[in-house]
Amino acid sequence: MAIMTSPQTYQPVLDRIAAEIEKTPGRGRPADYIPALAACDPRRFGMAVAEPDGTVYGVGDWRQPFSAQSITKVFTLALDLAREGDALWEHVGREPSGNPFNSLVQLEYENGIPRNPFINAGALVVTDRLHTQTEDAAGTLLDFLRAESGNDRLAINESVAASESAHGDRNAALGHFMAAYNNIDNPVPVLLDQYFRQCSVEASCADLALATGFLARHGIRADGTRLLSRSQAKQVNAIMLTCGTYDAAGDFAYRVGLPGKSGVGGGIIAVVPGHCTLCVWSPGLDERGNSVSGVAALDRFTTLTGLSVF
Ligand code: DON
């Protein structure tokens, strides 16, 4: 196997992966809990790699905006950690849950403290705390994504947000349950509105690979200012590795070997600390909510390039 380390080689690697994915049958099923996601064509595929200096390589539908969904949980975590630091960890844990992303089952045993910031319960806690800090969690997220990607047109799809809300009973249950344990600051309907708008950000692979760049640059934003300490950036990467793909995190680490975060829109971001960030999109999901072709493409990327944290 050829080990490729020069950035000049990213384009041929991306082209090769796209050609291989094109030939792969059985690409999973789009999320069907809201019509906007169910309508996505599972054959769509895009992938982008961003270097720490902002150079981006891409293939396929890499400039096509899609619903970022749970990928945004990485950015709200970083934005809240940057503001309140370790105080956050009194309200949410850092252990893999081993359960589906929308599960309620652990919360009662664990007194309303979610296992980690990437399952829905934990993300609700993070968004709640960010909203308390900023008075506009979703707007703070959007500003950050626009600044890091350099794309001012990046936006929240309000009709997707309304649809999320109309089908949001499990998230509402999680929010009210944690409020009963005094682990939510804001009124639950306010929090849910922020969370659904956060999930409904639309961005492309290029946008999200660029916006993730601070995690490859050890906490440094695109403009050279620091968002996270080096240690905090390491911590966020570690939580992505152990919790970013829910009850499939072990298999993702085994196959891909990178910190990664998936969303039910079919996107996955991944980080090669010090080297590059990636985003892949293909709407067909496996039964755990991770993009089938997305995981396969990242698996091929780390195999072909030898770039992984292991
Ligand atoms: O909270 C939800 O149900 C969705 N809006 C987001 C879930 C999601 O992307 C989980 N990821 N795989």
Image: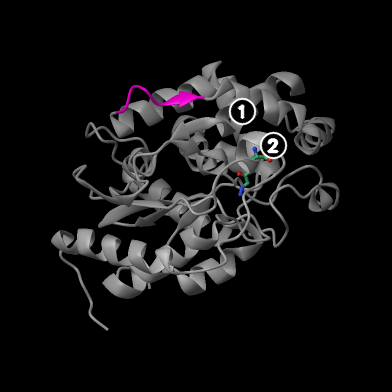
Pointer 1 residue Cβ closer than 8 Å to ligand 1: no
Q: Is residue 6 magenta?
A: no
Separation of marks 1 and 2 at Cα, in angstroms: 8 Å
Question: What mark, if any, has residue 34 been given in the picture?
Answer: 2
Does the magenta stretch mainly form a helix, a strand or a loop?
A: loop
Which x, y percent locates residue 148?
32, 33
User: Is label 1 in contact with label 2 (beta carbons under 8 Å)?
Assistant: yes
In-front residue for pair 72/21? 21
Does residue 28 appear to the left or right of 225 in the view shown? Answer: right
- Which amino acid, by three-letter code, is at mark 1? Val
Label 2 packing within 10 angstroms: few (<14), some (14-19), many (20+): some
Going by the image, does 307 lie left or right of 128? Answer: left
Vertical order, 89 against 259 (above or below): above
Residue 196 in percent (x, y) is at 64, 29
Look at 81% across and 34% down and name the residue there.
169
Q: Which is nearer the eye, 30 or 277?
A: 30
- Give the magenta part as a residue range: 151-156
Residue 49 appears in view? no
Q: Please tell me in which quarter of the rendered image ligand 1 is found.
A: top right
Any part of residue 228 in sight:
yes
Residue 154 lies within the magenta run: yes
Q: Which mark is residue 215?
A: none
Residue plotted at (54% across, 52% down):
42
| Residue at image location 60% in from the left, 56% down from the top | 285
Q: Which residue is mark 1?
A: 160
Q: How many marks?
A: 2
Task: Pick whichever, 93 or 42, lies toward us.
Answer: 42
Left or right, 171 with respect to 59, comes to right
x%, y% of residue 278?
A: 35, 53
